[in-house]
Image (cartoon, rainbow, N blue to C red):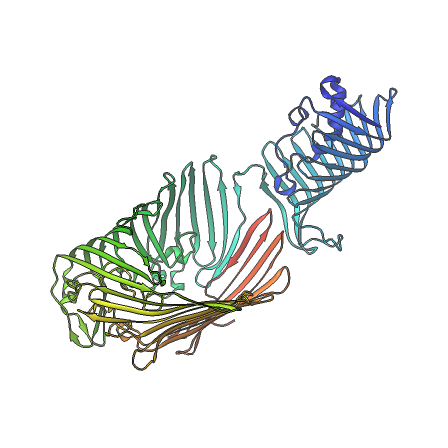
Amino acid sequence: MGVAANRAGMSNRTARLMGATALVALCAYAQLPQAAWAQSGDLSFEEYAPKDAQMLLTADNLIYDNDRNTITAAGGVQIEYAGNQLVADRVIYDRTTSRVMARGRVEIVEKGGNRIYADEIDVTDNFSDGFVNALRVETVDKTYFAAESAQREGGRVTTFNNGIYTACQPCEKKPDRPPIWQIKSQKIIWNGETKTVRFENARFEFFGMPIAYLPFFQVADPTVKRKSGFLIPSASYKKELGFGVKVPYYLALSPTYDLTVSGTYYTKQGFLGEAEWRQRFDNGQYSVKIAGIRQQEPEAWKATTVNGSETTRGMIGSKGKFQINPRWAFGWDVLAQSDKNFSRTYSISGFADTVQTSEIYLTGLDDRNYFDIRAYHFNIQEDVKTGRDEQQPWVLPSFDYSYTPDEAVAGGELNLDFNAQGLHRQNISLRNTAGTSRLDGAEGSSGRMTAEAEWKRSFVTSGGLVVTPILQARGDAIYTDYDAVTINGITNFEVNGSTVGSDVRSSYYRYMATAGLEVRWPVLFSTTSASHVLEPVAQVFVRPNARFQERLGIPNEDAQSLVFDATTLFERDKFSGYDRIEGGTRANVGLRYSGSFANGWTAHGLVGQSYHLAGDNSFAQPDLVHVGAYSGLETDVSDFVGMAGLVSPDGFAFSVGARLDEKTLDLRRADVKTAATLGNVTASLQYAFIEAQPLYGFNYDRQEVTGLTKVKFNENWSGFASGTYDLESKTLVKNSYGFAYGDDCFIYSMTYTRSENRTTHETSHSFGFAVSLRTIGDFGSSTGDLNTTF
């Protein structure tokens, strides 16, 4: 029979019967943690169900027993109420005891999608107390819970007896097989008032085998996004530190800020304390971290190292980022520490990179217009007492502004750029080797301001010829205030035993004007199975000599790297930064190719050469870091540069780039890369060659090969192997191996890495592992040096 009832028109007890019938089983699990069974909040009938909610009850029989004062729905009972569904063999409401009982194959489908199964449910009609027998829960987020019985008391505390929890789905083919992991607990106590879940006499099982036992542990109710408590500990090992165990504690102080304090005990070095404060605002967030230790055994490192000579060590660091409005952003990332290698040695999260950049910045971006101002300093975290860190400058500030008008100017595109930078360095970086000097950084202060404008416009003729005139103008103002040691190094600067130094001024003013023309003629060739485009390209740039380029007193801080290859062949100024400027008349010529084939393959290529036609060749002039040497541009006719590549639709790619001597065609530089995917195997191989560059400190050719292979064995298992081999020193510089397992509920990975020094051939070994249990947390360990042998 079917009965439809309106709650507003029923007596209080009848309404409680109808509501309790639909929600009777919900009360037993409504307060459990969301991570386990995806419920939240304190459910009572008045809060959960609308006052005008209707209930549809279907049963074979509806029995009123006035002697026992009960109402029974029996035989195929189905109840729908407020989006929830209940199915049972029998539902009984005892009006004398105010209890509701559902018995026999009880199943509830909650309106959120969760499913609850039980043999019997017995609960008071106000849901404050109750008992469930043989409970099983399946939630919409694929978590599973089972218990022999569950009891609720006082409307706040629910106790599950002999409970099991997992986030792994049962095996479809063998549902009786144990899941990958599960937690079995004698009692699971959920406290709705303190919002905590406590596991008593719990053990972790993998594939049905127990691997860990805990007398008790307690987690926050995941329905509360932020709650104070201990986080999952982690372990680590390093030869000089010993074994370490880290225990973090999280303090949820308010909805917008929190504090995490951690203590790590190392068996050799003692106790490391850490604290991190985080605060979030509507438009951004910031954090502050401090850490410190008093090392017990600094002698574990060599006395000649930073780690071995320090006892009391610490750091303070902060990161922040704020979006002022959709166009403007402000932020910082700063680090201050007792010595230059503390954060890296102790793997302080967020501050452990070998090169840590401390900076504060303001950035704006609007359409094609860009603004950026920042101050920064490089922290080189290394274990040597005197090295690169002491020679790093303070950049105060670095400023970039680029403006491109939306409207065309004289039919073409106008771009305006402005750059300024000021530097201060406390220690000079000057090297003298075999009669050759190299001054990477000057001691003292320097500054530069640059303004530049470029205009270009493209014309296309009826024959398909693309002609682009280019006009450019630039001016620089440069200031220097060098230390006497730097001035002496510049005036006595030597290259191959000959002094090429010059005097140093306190200020320089230079300019550059360029008139250029680029001509391209793309020609299309088509067949039934392919199309090809050949595009001859020629450029000429006419300009005066770069002013003061013979004076070494002009600093070179941002243009120390110069790579001449096919990607930079058609650059108007091939220097990498503003400190060096290209002068003289130069022509660049080349031939581009691109092809598309019917089978999905594509190909591309470029070959060309550059010619110095008049004036002084800027790449042949002396430079404090020899930036033009070995570039292939220091002669009037440059080296040949080229590149080619192939890409297939099924995952194969190949590319090669090379620079060849303009006379002998000897190989000066080469890069070869290939990658392919075949079924479940992905592999890549890279080869790099650079000819000897004595002025840079590389007296021998450099060439190395790097390979990487990844294999997916099946849906869950995968592995990888990688290695880098130095062909000149015949050294396996680095090789790594690892494997991983991953599915919806469990991820595990393990890696091993071996490294070898090219010169001393000292080796180091490290390994790491990580475990992730869905809804529980992540933990793992990693090690540094393990010894040279196992």
| Residue 446 sits above or below residue 113 on the image | below
- Can residue 755 be seen at all in this image of the molecule? no
| Residue lying farthest to the bottom in this orientation | 664
Q: Is residue 23 left or right of residue 392?
A: right
| Residue 654 sits above or below residue 255 on the image | below
Q: Which residue does the image show at 52% across and 57% down from the upper left?
A: 781
- Can residue 555 be seen at all in this image of the molecule? yes
* Residue 700 locus on image (x, y percent): 33, 78
* Residue 513 locus on image (x, y percent): 19, 58
**Closest to the observer, 438 or 670:** 670
**Closest to the observer, 289 or 118:** 118
**Closest to the observer, 611 or 264:** 611
Q: Is residue 757 left or right of residue 746?
A: left
| Residue lying farthest to the front in this orientation | 462
- Classify residue 148 by image quadrant: top right
* Residue 34 locus on image (x, y percent): 62, 39
* Residue 280 locus on image (x, y percent): 43, 38
Q: How many marks?
A: 0
Q: Is residue 741 left or right of residue 318?
A: right
Q: Which residue does the image show at 47% across and 34% down from the upper left?
A: 254
| Residue 610 sits above or below residue 407 on the image | below
Q: Is residue 254 left or right of residue 776?
A: left
**Closest to the observer, 37 or 236:** 37
